[in-house]
Image (cartoon, helix red, strand yellow):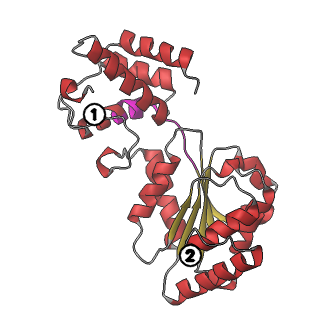
Amino acid sequence: MYEDYWQFNQKPFENTSLEEFYYPSEVHQAALLKLRYVVENRRPAGLLTGAAGLGKTLLVKKLFEQLNSEFSPRIHVVFPQMPHAQLLAHLAIELTGAPSASATPTIDQSVRWIENALAENVEMGKHVVLAIDEAHLVKDLDSLEMLRLLLNFEASSPSGLTLLLVGQTEILPVLDRLPGLEEQLSVKCLLRPFTVEETISYVVHRLTAAGRKRPVFEGEALESIHVMTGGIPRRIDRLCDLALLIAYAEDQSSIRPEHVESVSEELVSIQPD
């Protein structure tokens, strides 16, 4: 809607995994390096955690893009809230490529399928990467224990499977109750919000990636964005996108602090985070 007005090639604050929009902050790059270490050294498991909106899912996508072909299949489970038997069946189908419309396998069938698939994968010199996104939503401890048991298959130790748990920090006390799984975690990556300098750099980076060659947000407005969002990327995207829309509608040539503050107040009043 406002792309031509601001001279963008595309909207700068969309939820996208396009390479040119990825902002390599220090904390995100450090987490990505640790995740690559876990996978490429074929460690059993790793943890990526942090508050909502910090870009955990995007990092998983970036990781999968950077891995070479020997690390496959790459399975990204984004809705893990299912009974452990159903989750096991889902993983078995993903690993074997069985048609999703076929009858749901029993637990015994799922275990055999997974064990055989891992063994065949190892014989081909490949390594499975399994990312469980939103892992903090897994309330069934049996599901987490089942994931731990997958790491105990003969074929998956030490070179058949790497499990990545990805979720908000609520998962940490849950892992404390499962010492067997917690001990398998070779690395734990904790994402933090952007600093004010990173927030400013992030906004400028996204605007530039979208094709804008001149500043849009005034300097104090960028500082206000950090204050209003706490440096959380998802909130920054939402605030900046709406600020661009409102300023376009009002025929503004730039976005000042009062514009950002007005939009932020409106978001807080009608759209809780």
Q: Quadrant of the C terminus?
A: top right
- Label whose residue precedes the other's in the sequence (2 or 1): 2
Verify whether residue 49 appears in magenta.
no
Q: In the displayed structure, does residue 179 sit left or right of residue 230?
A: right
Q: List x then y, in percent, for residue 64.
A: 44, 63
Q: How many marks?
A: 2
**Residue that appears at 60% across and 81% down:** 118
Q: List x then y, in percent, for residue 71.
A: 47, 74
Q: Note whether 49 is above or below 39 in the view shown.
A: above
Question: Which SS class for mark 2?
Answer: loop
- Is residue 165 among the parts visible in the rendering? yes
Verify whether residue 201 appears in magenta.
yes
Q: Note whether 127 is above or below 119 in the view shown.
A: above
Which image quadrant is residue 183 in? bottom right
Of residues 41 and 2, the one drawn nearer to the viewer in this rendering: 2
Determine contact: label 2, label 1, CB under 8 Å: no
**Residue that appears at 45% across and 60% down:** 63
Q: Which residues are magenta?
A: 190-202
Of residues 133 and 47, the one drawn nearer to the viewer in this rendering: 133
**Residue that appears at 48% across and 88% down:** 124
Q: Note whether 183 is above or below 30 in the view shown.
A: below
Question: Which SS class for mark 1?
Answer: helix
Q: In the displayed structure, does residue 59 sit left or right of residue 169?
A: left
Q: List x then y, in percent, for residue 161.
A: 59, 74
Alpha carbon distance from label 2 to label 1: 43 Å
Q: What residue would you read off at disc 1?
A: 207
Q: What residue would you read off at disc 2?
A: 98
